[in-house]
Image: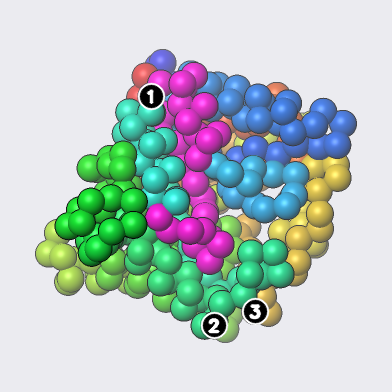
Amino acid sequence: MNITAPAHTKPAPFRPKTRLGFNTRVSFNDTAGPAQGLRDGIELYKAAERLGYQSGWAYQRHFDHYLSSPLPFFAAAGQHAKHITLGSAVIPMRYQDPILLAEAAGTTDLLINGRLELAISTGANAAFDAVFGTVDTDARTEAKRRQARFLAAISGEILHTVVGSGQGAPEGAELRVTPHSPTLRSRIRQGSASLGSGIQAAELGIGLISGTVQHDHAEGETFGAYQARIIEAYRSIWRGKWGTEPPPVAVAASILVGTTPELREKYAAYDLERRTVGIAASRPKGALAPPPPPAGAQISPVFQGTPDQVIEAVFTDPGIASADEVILFLPPAFGLEENVRLLRDLAETVAPAFGWSASW
């Protein structure tokens, strides 16, 4: 694939984007049903790979018209798309059994030849305790405990040494998660919505992906400025603690390139809806209305307009400028054809301007 970059000069602080990805909800509506939504999700990964995208991320949401169990989906999609990496953005650890997740992740990663990237979160959201059960500690403390156990499990650490009989293995056996994928831990990321989570990722020695909702920003601080501050803190702490350069940082962003007047009108309407109703914007038919974000939270802007307008807006956004990889956030209610068009228009008109080129 040969794409000629538009004649734009990147400002000095703008880091070249070596990778381009997308984030999908793998959503379905009440008309077509969940099976069609899952099949469309696989087709989206195949189309993105043909366009040269390097990564595809899927959001997890329980009890709704979205993907609830990403790993079986990745195992299936990875049999059709042979090059693109497949990642979760994000899996909340509060509701995961860390050992079962480690087993499923290892199995999936081996099936797709080491292309799994898991982004996990340890936020304080405890919306589904009534279903999954309460814990003695608060939600964030419990999520961090499960995260630590998960990281130990995928690292191949001994989880238990059998003492005595009746434990499912001979006495003295050292139990580790199998099957083990030895490089998987290097592809784990922290989903970041705050400075604290960015620092946590650096201290744990895992990657970072910055999402579309933030909290704990300074008064008057823009979304992009706070995002850049999180990324800088992550890199600084990583260098100080590990003595190496940190892994590439990814940011999710709504970048909707209007190549026709009709598309510009459509994307402007989505932008207005997102600024008006926030994360409740663009829900597929039958989906639940999400709870309001925590007090003080802010959501990412929508970069929409002509290709030139979008390029200019992206260049001047501090968060995107600081990142190594951009993840296109796809509106959840958009169908397969609309999403493929968004992927194509970004790849052909805007992404080359900030240093990206297709891989295959």
Residue 157 at what x, y percent from top left? 22, 57
- Compared with 313, 227 (above or below) is below
Report which quarter residue 300 is drawn in. bottom right
Q: Range of the magenta residues?
A: 71-99
Neighbours of disc 1 within 10 Å: few (<14), some (14-19), many (20+): many
Residue at (16, 65) in percent of width and height = 242
Classify residue 299 as left or right of residue 290.
left
Q: Secondary structure at mark 1?
A: loop
* Furthest residue in direction front, as rendered: 165
Q: Earlier in the sequence, mark 2 or mark 3?
A: 2
The label shown at residue 136 is 2
Neighbours of disc 2 within 10 Å: few (<14), some (14-19), many (20+): few
Report which quarter residue 189 is drawn in. bottom left
Q: Is residue 28 magenta?
A: no
Foreground of the two, 69 or 339: 69
Can you tell which of label 1 and label 3 is closer to the viewer?
A: 1
Q: Secondary structure at mark 3?
A: loop
Q: Which residue position is annotated with label 3?
A: 296
Residue type, label 3:
Gly
Residue type, label 1:
His
Classify residue 23 as left or right of residue 247.
right
Q: Earlier in the sequence, mark 2 or mark 1?
A: 1
Residue 150 at what x, y percent from top left? 37, 59
Residue 22 at what x, y percent from top left? 53, 39
Q: Earlier in the sequence, mark 1 or mark 3?
A: 1
Mark pair 2, 3: CA separation: 27 Å
Mark pair 2, 1: CA separation: 43 Å
Residue at (70, 39) in percent of width and height = 27
The label shown at residue 83 is 1
